[in-house]
Amino acid sequence: MLGTLATTDDGRYALRFERRYAHPPEKVWRAITEAKHLRAWFPAVVDFDLRPGATLRFLPTAEQVRRYGMTEDQAATGEITRVDPPHLLEYTWDAEVLRWELTADGVGGCRLVFTNVFDDRAMAAPAAAGWHAGLEVVAAQLDEREIDWSPWERADALTGEYVGSID
């Protein structure tokens, strides 16, 4: 289930992922907003203040420091732009927009649509691979399956697949 890439009306790029989970929106909401879950898959250290207009601060993970030479104090900022628990969360991360939509499926599960909007086309394949790997970790967390692999290594492995599918 690869993500897709589209050009927005204003000339930006939107990566879109759709996933179905056999878990209610409330449980998936916790996986995408609570620090104890985010640490396993989100590509930054962030704690959410789930109020519209709240400022977010994104810090590098230990793996980003190791892999990319980032310093632990390199922070990015963002803002919560829309929030309707457990159905909608939208926020900025510097110039990017991240939008999480959860819809109950009527049989105890839900559909997640995640969209990441950004300016630089060159980041599409690596970003898609990273989000894809992160969503695999979310699925494992929800199903209470052990994660015995690195999402970073998984993203590296998926990048070539995304280069071929969205370029």
Image (tube, rainbow, N blue to C red):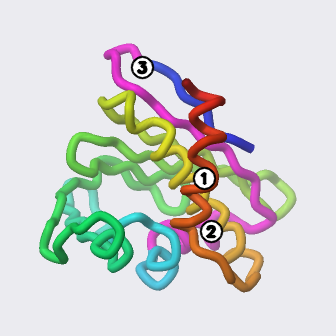
Q: Looking at the picture, how far across and down is residue 51, in whole percent?
A: 28, 62
Is 48 rendered above or below residue 161?
A: below
Q: Quadrant of residue 142?
A: bottom right
**Residue at position x 40%, y 47% in the image:** 98
Please rate how many residues cluster around mark 2, counting C-alpha atoms within 10 Å: few if below 14, some from 14 to 19, many from 20.
Answer: many
Looking at the image, how many numbered discs can be counted on the residues? Answer: 3
Q: Are marks 1 and 3 in contact (CB under 8 Å)?
A: no
The Cα–Cα distance between marks 1 and 3, rounded to whole angstroms, is 20 Å
The residue carrying mark 2 is 138
Relative side of 91 to 31, left or right: left
The residue carrying mark 1 is 132
Magenta highlight range: 8-33
Query: Which of label 1 and label 2 is nearer to you?
Result: 1
Q: Which callout, 2 or 3, points at the residue further toward the start of the chain?
A: 3
Relative side of 49 to 23, left or right: left
Image quadrant in which the C terminus is located:
top right
**Residue at position x 76%, y 76% in the image:** 143
Image quadrant in which the N terminus is located:
top right
Q: Quadrant of residue 49?
A: bottom left
Label 2 sits on a secondary structure element that is helix
Nearer to me, 13 or 157: 157
The residue carrying mark 3 is 8
Q: Looking at the picture, how far across and down is residue 56, in whole percent?
A: 22, 63
Q: Amino acid at mark 1?
A: His
Relative side of 23 to 92, left or right: right
Viewer can see residue 16: yes
**Residue at position x 63%, y 50% in the image:** 158
Q: Which callout, 1 or 2, points at the residue further toward the start of the chain?
A: 1
Relative side of 130 to 72, left or right: right
Q: Are marks 1 and 2 in contact (CB under 8 Å)?
A: no
Please rate how many residues cluster around mark 3, counting C-alpha atoms within 10 Å: few if below 14, some from 14 to 19, many from 20.
Answer: few
